[in-house]
């Protein structure tokens, strides 16, 4: 006759329960979705900056993100959709805060221009690829008149208009040079900062951010500012 094993005492059963591995809680679907989208965007942004949009494939984006090609298409319509999302993100992360400072009534025109230079330098250090993406894509999509170029043109136009208003306000206050068209001055200022960032990219990020900011401020503003208010 088989011998029955004695049942565990109640205290023993409680101890065994406590020592058991906790049940694994599944990751919510919305969290998994966000994690996948974030991985795709990070991968695509890096590749677009390093290699360009047209030389980057969806397969490469998926591989760098550690995903399948099908996973990318679950979350994005196509490669163009990925870039449009990245440009909207760049606008929110880079352009909107810069425009907010340019439109802040608590700053005078000179302070706004100084803030503009400093903000660009800060963002270039903290969000390097996000800053470079619109600049590099503006060359790659120049003259195409497709949604990518339209999105980039809109970003630049908003910057030109905000800077032109600051320059006009400074001229009225007698603190900024009054010769030439304000929008053209704004365009030159944008071109200077874009060129500076492209040089930084060519140098592999070896430029000193602090020194670059000081030199930029001195070179840009010495030709525009008549006096501090």
Image (cartoon, rainbow, N blue to C red):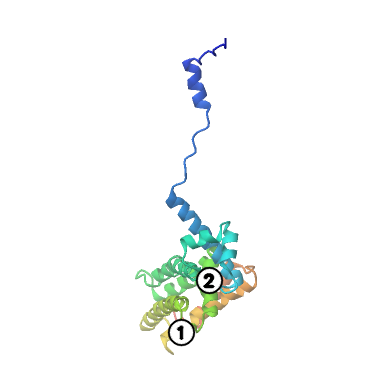
Q: Which residue is mark 2?
A: 133
Give the camera-side residue of 68 and 61.
Answer: 68
Q: Residue furthest top?
A: 1
How crowded pointer 1 is (Cα within 10 Å; few <14, some 14-19, many 20+) is rated as some
Where in the figure is residue 80, as x and y percent of width and height? Answer: 49, 71
Q: Secondary structure at mark 1?
A: helix
Pointer 2 with pointer 1, Cβ within 8 A = no
Residue that badge 1 annotates: 185
Q: Residue 85: image x %, image y %?
A: 46, 67
Say which residue appears at 53% left-offset and 58% top-offset: 39
Left/right of residue 146 with respect to residue 169 in the rendered view: right
Q: Residue at x 51, y 78 (%)?
A: 138
Of all residues, the one furthest to the front in this rendering is 1
Q: Nearer the viewer, residue 76 or 198?
A: 76
**Mark whose residue sits in front, 2 or 1:** 2
Q: Is residue 218 visible?
A: no
The answer for how far apart the CA atoms under marks 2 and 1 are is 24 Å
> Could you say which is closer to the camera, residue 138 or residue 123?
138
Residue at left offset 50%, top offset 26%: 18
Judge whether residue 176 can be spotted in this image: yes
Residue 28, given in percent of the width and then of the height, sits at 44, 47
What is the quadrant of the C terminus in the image? bottom left
Q: Residue at x 53, y 13 (%)?
A: 6
Q: Is residue 116 left or right of residue 43?
A: left
Q: Secondary structure at mark 2?
A: helix
- Residue 103: x and y in percent read 37, 72
Marker count (numbered): 2
């Amino acid at each position: 006759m088989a011998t029955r094993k004695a049942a565990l005492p109640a205290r023993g059963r409680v101890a065994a329960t406590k020592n058991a591995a906790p049940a694994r809680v599944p990751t919510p679907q919305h969290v998994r979705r966000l994690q996948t989208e974030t991985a795709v965007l990070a991968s695509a942004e890096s590749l677009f900056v390093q290699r360009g949009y047209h030389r980057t494939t969806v397969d490469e984006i998926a591989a760098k993100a550690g995903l399948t090609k099908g996973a990318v298409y679950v979350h994005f319509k196509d490669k163009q959709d990925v870039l449009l999302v990245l440009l909207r993100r760049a606008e929110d992360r880079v352009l909107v805060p810069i425009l907010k400072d340019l439109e802040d009534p608590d700053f005078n025109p000179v302070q706004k221009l100084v803030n503009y230079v400093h903000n660009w330098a800060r963002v270039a250090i903290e969000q390097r690829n996000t800053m470079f993406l619109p600049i590099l894509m503006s060359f790659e999509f120049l003259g195409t008149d497709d949604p990518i170029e339209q999105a980039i043109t809109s970003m630049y136009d908003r910057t030109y208009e905000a800077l032109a208003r600051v320059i006009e306000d400074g001229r009225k206050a007698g603190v900024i040079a009054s010769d030439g068209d304000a929008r053209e001055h704004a365009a030159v200022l944008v071109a200077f900062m874009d060129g500076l960032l492209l040089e930084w990219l060519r140098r592999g990020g070896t430029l000193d951010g602090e020194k670059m900011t000081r030199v930029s401020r001195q070179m840009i503003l010495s030709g525009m500012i008549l006096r501090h208010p």
